[in-house]
Image: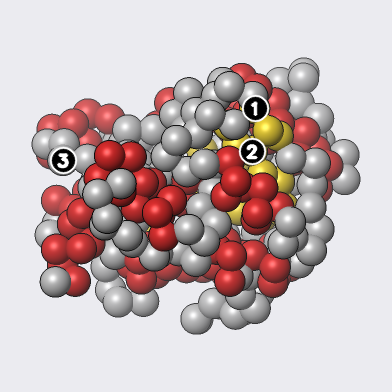
Amino acid sequence: MGAAINTLAFPAPRLPQAFYEEELLRRRDLVWLTTSEGERIPACHVRRSFSGNSFFTGQPMTIIYSHGNAEDLGVHLDYIDALAQVASADVFSYEYVGYSLSRLEGAQPSEEACYRSIDAAWRYVVDELKIPPRQVIIFGRSIGSGPSVDLASRSHVENSAFSPLDIAGVLLQSPLERRMESGARAVLGYTTSLVGYYLDIFKNYEKIDKIKAPVAIMHGSSDEVVPMANGAALYDLLQRPYEPLWLDGYGHNNMPQSVCFDYVKEFVRSVSGH
């Protein structure tokens, strides 16, 4: 039963090996992480591009990015490349167990596997690369808000010397709050959720009030996958709310990238002290 639910809940793209050989395995910034269960997952560490318009002169901030559902690391490479450039920040985008190359190795996705994946990303960034937590921003989109909020709300990560409570900030785009129906929509699709299949995963409402860093939320008012009421409810629970971005008339998958990136850039500037 659990395996069947995970298959429905985490519809990883089923792309062939050749796609990842062309799009992902050739990247110079590709690294491999190992979870606490010994699972291998890929990640890309995109370095910010230096330009005369960059507002950073010292060490850059690093964004740990958790992607949405029904996509994977190989699919959003252009997105993270652009994010690093616009935000003038390094972007560390990791993969979930059971997605992309991990899926091709036979691994299965699950909620707990997502937590193991972001923990592996955290250990690599702060323990191996020695990036101080105060230079780290955790960014989750849609279902990616689950592992992001979970990590940012914890005082300890297994086998790490550093606490996620000390990070610079958290960014959430179209995040889940508490409604099982919203969770089902995010992972199964709008129609499927309405026929009575409820999935209560990534209970952000139980964790987000423990985050000590500033939290920025962006959400579209016409989102039918994860209604904006989710983002608004999470905002009300924050210890240190940052001015939210409510985008009138936009849904779950058509929020304007340029507007969202500008919001991210201003948040990065704010929490970095520049």
Badge 2: few (under 14), some or many (20 or more) residues near its Cα, within 10 Å?
A: many
**Residue carrying label 3:** 14
Observer able to see residue 51: yes
Q: Which residue is mark 2?
A: 218
Q: Which mark lies nearer to you, 1 or 2?
A: 1
Q: Is 30 positioned to the left or the right of 145 in the image? A: left
Q: Residue at x 79, y 63 (%)?
A: 239
**For the residues bearing labels 1 and 2, Cβ distance under 8 angstroms:** yes
Tell me the amino acid under the disc marked 1. Answer: Leu
Q: Secondary structure at mark 3?
A: loop
Residue at disc 2, secondary structure: strand
Residue where numbered disc 1 is placed: 247
Do residues under tags 3 and 2 come within 8 Å of each other at their CB atoms? no
Q: Position of residue 238 (x, y in %)?
A: 74, 60
Q: Mark 3 packing: few (<14 Cα in 10 Å), some, or many (20+)?
A: few
The Cα–Cα distance between marks 1 and 2, rounded to whole angstroms, is: 7 Å
Left or right: residue 190 versus residue 21 is right
Picture residue at 15% right of the left edge, 67% below the top: 3
Name the side, left or right, on which 155 lies relative to 76: right
